[in-house]
Each structure stands twice: as C-alpha cells, then as structure tokens.
Image (cartoon, rainbow, N blue to C red):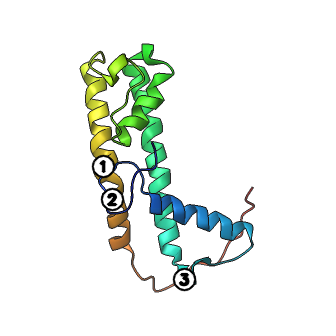
C-alpha cells in the first residue's frame, strides 16, 4: 500500500516512478556505475536525490504517526502501523474492526488518520514539486569527503 499509483494518478502514498528511480539507482550502484541509465537515457542525480528525500520523509512521517497512534490508542498494538500506512496510501482499509471502520478510535486518532490521508494524497506531490523548484546553482563546491559507508 505504501507505493501508490502512477505519477499523474489519484492514488496516495509514494508514486511508482519514485520507487522505480530508487530501484534503478540501487541497481546502478550494485553494478559500479556512477550514472543511473535506463532505456538509453540518464536519470539526473537531482531526480535520484528527490526520490530518496520523498521516500525517507514519507517513512519518517509514517513512523512518527504510528508512535502517535499507539500513544493515543495503546490497545491498537499491531494494527497501528497497518492503519497508518493504509491512511497514508488512501486505500481505506483498517485492521482494527470488521468493515474497516475507525470510528472506535478516539477523536485525536481519527484526526491523525485524516491528516495522513491528506498528507499521503498531496504531501508527496507537494514535497517533490518544492524540491524541484528549490534547486539553486551553487557558485562554489566544498572539498570532497569520502566517509566509510556500510
């Protein structure tokens, strides 16, 4: 559910194209290539960074929302993460009660899920557009560092 529809679709969650860019970037890294190439085209490094930022921020929002839902309704236990991801992806499912109703949640829990629905539908699009518009040309570059990764 975390991965929604196409780039122009109405599905919530992150978009399929965002995940595809990250999978292609990992594949390029595993092959030892510096560029991300697909079908004879190179994907810009800025696009890969945007995709990574969108996915990591979405995961952070989901983690914080799951913890908040557990604080609001501790009896939710294992279903909290499912409900949070379901709300973010606008799929409309709930693991808490038959029929997918969340009416048994306290008001704060319902508002949290409502905020996640709106964030999942418009948040990733808004974030991606803000990141794309925010890119500025730097007049200088810092020296390169090579920290150990792994």
Q: Nearer the viewer, mark 3 or mark 2?
A: 3
Which residue extends farthest bottom? 139
Q: Which residue is mark 2?
A: 125
Task: Measuring from the top left, give residue 99's x and y in whole percent.
Answer: 33, 21
Label 3–label 2 contact, CB within 8 A: no
The residue depicted at 36 percent of the width and 20 percent of the height is 72
Q: CA distance from mark 3 to mark 2?
A: 24 Å
Question: For the residue carrying disc 1, how many other residues have a C-alpha within 10 Å: few (<14), some (14-19), or many (20+)?
Answer: many
Task: Measuring from the top left, give residue 57's x and y in whole percent.
Answer: 45, 51
* Residue 52 shown left or right of residue 146 in the figure: left
Q: Which is more toward the observer, 1 or 72?
A: 1
Mark closer to the chain start, 3 or 1? 3
* Residue 114 shown left or right of residue 82 in the figure: left
Which residue extends farthest front? 99
Q: Can you say which quadrant of the picture contains the C terminus?
A: bottom right
Q: Which residue is mark 3?
A: 41
Count how many numbered circles sit on residues in the image.
Answer: 3
* Residue 3 shown left or right of residue 150 in the figure: left
Label annotation for residue 61: none
Secondary structure under tag 2 reads helix
Q: Which residue is mark 1?
A: 121
């Amino acid at each position: 559910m975390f991965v929604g529809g196409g780039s122009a679709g109405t599905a919530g969650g992150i978009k399929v194209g965002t995940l595809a860019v990250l999978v292609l970037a990992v594949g390029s890294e595993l092959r030892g290539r510096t560029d991300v190439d697909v079908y004879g085209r190179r994907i810009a490094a800025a696009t890969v960074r945007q995709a990574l930022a969108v996915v990591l921020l979405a995961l952070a929002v989901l983690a914080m929302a799951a913890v908040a839902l557990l604080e609001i309704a501790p009896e939710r236990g294992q279903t909290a993460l499912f409900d949070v991801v379901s709300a973010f992806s606008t799929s409309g499912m709930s693991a808490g009660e038959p029929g997918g109703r969340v009416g048994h949640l306290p008001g704060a829990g319902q508002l949290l899920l409502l905020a996640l629905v709106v964030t999942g539908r418009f948040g990733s699009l808004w974030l991606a557009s803000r990141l794309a518009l925010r890119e500025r040309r730097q007049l200088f570059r810092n020296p390169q560092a090579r920290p150990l990764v792994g």
